[in-house]
Image (spheres, rainbow, N blue to C red):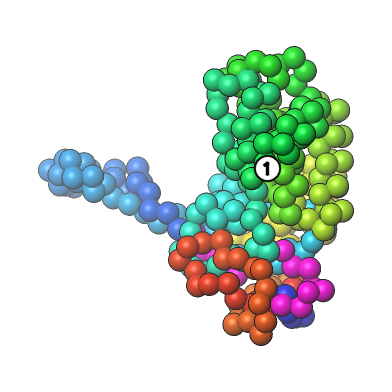
Amino acid sequence: MAVLDVTDPFAQVTVAVQDVHVRYRVASTDATERRRRRHALGRVARTVLGNDPKVIVRALSGISFVAHSGEQVGIVGQNGSGKSTLLRIIAGLETPARGRVLAESTPVLIGVNAALVPDLSGEENIRLGCLAMGLTPTQADAATPEVTELAGLGKAIYLPMKTYSSGMGARLRFAIAAAANPHILLIDEALSTGDAAFKERSDARMQSLRAGAGTVFLVSHAAQTIEESCTRAIWLNYGRLVLDGPADDVALRYRKWAWAIAKDKPQQAKRIIEDAFAQRHQTSVEIDRPRRPRNYHPRHARQPGAQSQQAGTP
């Protein structure tokens, strides 16, 4: 296993994820039903006090990887696999139960960083979103034509955002986020809607970001989108990292597994995912004290101050 010292300026590591675990305590219908018949009076008391039986859901379990400048990393997995949770952890919007994430600059998560107002028009929201991401008023005004063209909403750009479909809103958020030229861009299903012209424009914009030594993370249920758009892919399954490698290989394996699940062929699906686990290269990320200052920032308040890192790659 190779070890990469990201305090080296030539390493070009943008994000280091170290042994991240995320757990949620949620009410369980199953647990409630088991107790309902045995302890009816106790059930009433628990409901009144807000103490319904809870179970632990492990959204992410021991996730470790490093991302580099110029990479476009696709994240695939079925619903509930932890894809969106991973993006929110990288963005610093959630705190892991264990582990840490360091980023070279502030990641921009589409749909969150742009504080948009439904009652305002798309055009007005472009300016508002650009200002919210740190652009000056002059820069926001200058960026508006490019954002409008990238979103490709036509005359709808002058209508209130509350009249937009979810796909139109996603396209506008992507265009606004891209206007800030973020070094680390996080996209959660935003590009799965839209026509071929929008896909071509958005692909060109992401390639431009990558060419500027940026890193793009793209979550999608569509393995073909990951295969066509990304250089690398991470496959998650119930919070576990199944495979991390070239986008075409990972997307193909995931597509075969998803097909087997859809066709009710559990044994075939089991073989595919077990083969993927067996061929996965383990990644170890170690974060140590700095030998010299670097601009890597912890993404979560509970983590210690900025430190140097050592990131192991497969």
**Residue numbers of the magenta segment:** 7-22
Amino acid at dot 1 = Leu
Image quadrant in which you'd find residue 124:
top right
**Residue density around tag 1, few if under 14, some if 14–19, many if 20 or more, within 10 Å:** some
Vertical order, 255 against 103 (above or below): above
Q: Secondary structure at mark 1?
A: loop
| Residue 13 sits inside the magenta stretch | yes
Vertical order, 5 against 62 (above or below): below
| Residue 297 sits inside the magenta stretch | no
Residue 159 in the image: state x and y as whole percent: 65, 15
Q: Nearer the viewer, residue 186 or 160?
A: 160
Residue at 48% x, 59% y is: 95
Residue 200 in the image: state x and y as whole percent: 87, 34
Residue lying furthest left: 41
Residue 51 placement, left or right of 249: left
Residue 40 placement, left or right of 124: left
Check the picture and name the quadrant holding the C terminus: bottom right
Residue at 61% x, 32% y is: 128
Residue at 29% x, 43% y is: 33
Residue at 63% x, 43% y is: 133
Vertical order, 123 against 307 (above or below): above
Vertical order, 132 against 2 (above or below): above
Q: Which residue is mark 1?
A: 135
Image quadrant in which you'd find residue 19:
bottom right
